[in-house]
Amino acid sequence: MHNSLWGTTTISYKGCAAQVFFFAFFMAAEYFLLTIMCYDRYVAICKPLHYGTLLGSRACAHMAAAAWATGFLNALLHTTSTFSLPLCQGNALGQFFCEIPHILKLSCSHSGYLREIGLLTISCLLGFGCFVFIMLSYVQIFRAVLRIPSQQGWHKAFSTCLPHLAVVSLFVSTATFAHLKPPSISSPSLDLVVSVLYSVVPPALNPLIYSLRNQELKDAIRKTMTGCFSEPKRWLFSSVNHS
């Protein structure tokens, strides 16, 4: 954000390492929280009578803590592995942020490169496992929804689940492609587009999947917007009357 606002294109070595760590940490935690959200919706729709037992406050706290702890461990492993490599191919990343695949291109250690590729592969396999869990959960969710006789119930369930499923699919497909695509199809423009799709778009859509389905929040937004548009009209009416 600083570089974008001030028009600079440089970052310090420590700053790059910190950026990689926090990026990996928050993106991994985000993905695990998306998986937990899927489980929450599966229990709410398929096992509503057991919801209080399976997803009590303690269970939710444990799952959230596990998501953040796993994200922290993932970020620590990747940052340590990446920045332990000797870099001898210059210092131009060719990306708008410090992304691990672009840092690896600057490495001259073949064994270290393979080690980090192995870690990336394990992370992607773990992410794919979560994705399979999400898909299987949604199969069960949609089967349960289709048994609902009310069309209003269908609309409510699908409008709640489909935005979440779309964001998860976009996140997994683009992140996996960005980190595991073969070098033969790599290009600066393609790398930029893919990186934006998995690093910027899913977080930007968080309000849609986390809170815009909340009726109280929608009512508050509607009231705020109505107030913003009605204030100038009242002021204009008052001015004309006064004249």
Image: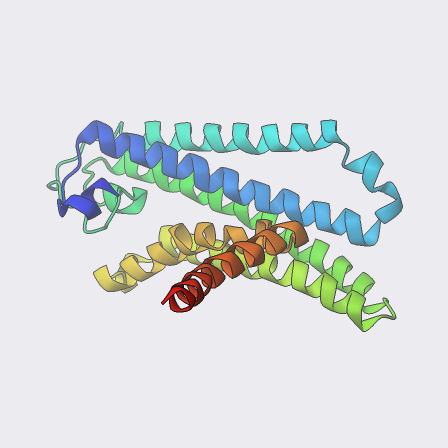
- The residue under the point 22% across, 27% down is 14
Q: How many numbered circles does the render carry?
A: 0
Relative height, residue 8 to residue 215 (above, below): above
User: Dividing the picture into quarters, in which one does residue 190 lie?
Assistant: bottom left
Quarter of the picture holding the C terminus? bottom left
Q: Is 103 on the left or on the right of 164, as rendered?
A: left
- The residue under the point 37% across, 34% down is 22
Relative height, residue 189 to residue 20 (above, below): below
Q: Is 36 on the left or on the right of 144, as rendered?
A: left
Quarter of the picture holding the N terminus? top left
Q: Kindly tell me whether residue 122 is visible in this rendering.
A: no
Q: Is 188 on the left or on the right of 115, as rendered?
A: left
Q: Kindly tell me whether residue 161 is visible in this rendering.
A: yes
Image position, residue 204 (x, y; %): 44, 53
Q: What's the coloring here?
A: rainbow
Image position, residue 178 (x, y; %): 36, 54
- The residue under the point 43% across, 34% down is 25
Relative height, residue 221 to residue 146 (above, below): above
Image position, residue 24 (x, y; %): 40, 38
- The residue under the point 30% across, 35% down is 19
Residue extending furthest left?
A: 90
Image position, residue 23 (x, y; %): 37, 39
User: Dividing the picture into quarters, in which one does residue 57 lie?
Assistant: top right
Residue extending furthest front?
A: 243
Q: Nearer the viewer, residue 118 or 172?
A: 172
